[in-house]
Image (tube, rainbow, N blue to C red):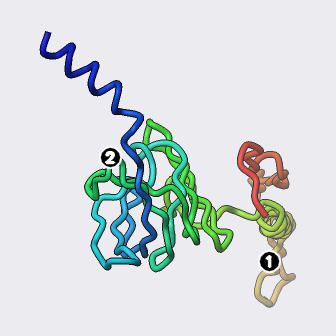
Amino acid sequence: MKETIRQAILSMVENKIPITVQWATVDAVDPDNALLTATGLEDGLPFDDVLIGIGSDGVLAIPKVGSKVLIALLENSNTNAAVVMTESLESYRIKLDNGKYLVLAKEGEILINGDGFGGMVKVGELVQRLNRVEKALNQLTSEFNAHTHPSPPAPSNPVVTSAPSVPSSVKVSLTKRNQLENKTVNHG
């Protein structure tokens, strides 16, 4: 009975509790936990653990440190706050619940699950470089197979050595773009 009365009162006043908003300056951002800390512009009071998203999965708009954000104080509580608007963004972060993520930075940088593997390969340029190496290797193999050594001069007729008795069978085919290219991820 007591709980029913509490629920009835709560449902009557729930929509009457105003949401207060305040402008603040971003001091630090923790995108892994979807939180930031900020300082209120009007009163200089700190805001800790302000939500920039619901959980750390999904799409997060990461505010730039030093920029202004509009913070909603849910139930008028500084300890229950969320960002509703940002002046300037550092990046967008799209994170799936399996831990995979994509970051789109303002400078045009794109990170797919971090930067541990370095930049993506420019496939056209890689194919050109590989083809030059493959042609050089094929040329060296042909020259090796056709190469002979004259013997040093001797009193009798000089003897000419023949081509290798077992010629190299190495023949490298030229790399094709579709052998290297991942068509699922494109850039440039």
Crowding at mark 2 (Cα within 10 Å: few <14, some 14-19, many 20+):
some
Labelled disc at residue 180? none
Residue in the image at 87% along x and 82% along y: 157
The image position of residue 162, as x and y in percent, is: 82, 66
- Quadrant assignment for the N terminus: top left
On the image, numbered disc 2 is attached to which residue? 75
On the image, numbered disc 1 is attached to which residue? 149
Nearer to us in this view, 172 or 186? 186
- Quadrant assignment for the C terminus: bottom right
Q: What element carries label 2?
A: helix
**Residue 162 in sight from this viewpoint:** no
Which kind of residue does numbered mark 1 sit on? His
Nearer to us in this view, 40 or 177? 40
Residue in the image at 44% along x and 36% along y: 98
Left or right: 28, with 120 as reference point: left
Q: Closer to us: mark 2 or mark 1?
A: 2
Q: Which of marks 2 and 1 is nearer the N terminus?
A: 2
The image position of residue 22, as x and y in percent, is: 43, 65
Tell me if label 2 and label 1 are in contact, CB under 8 Å.
Answer: no
**What is the quadrant of residue 144 in the picture?**
bottom right
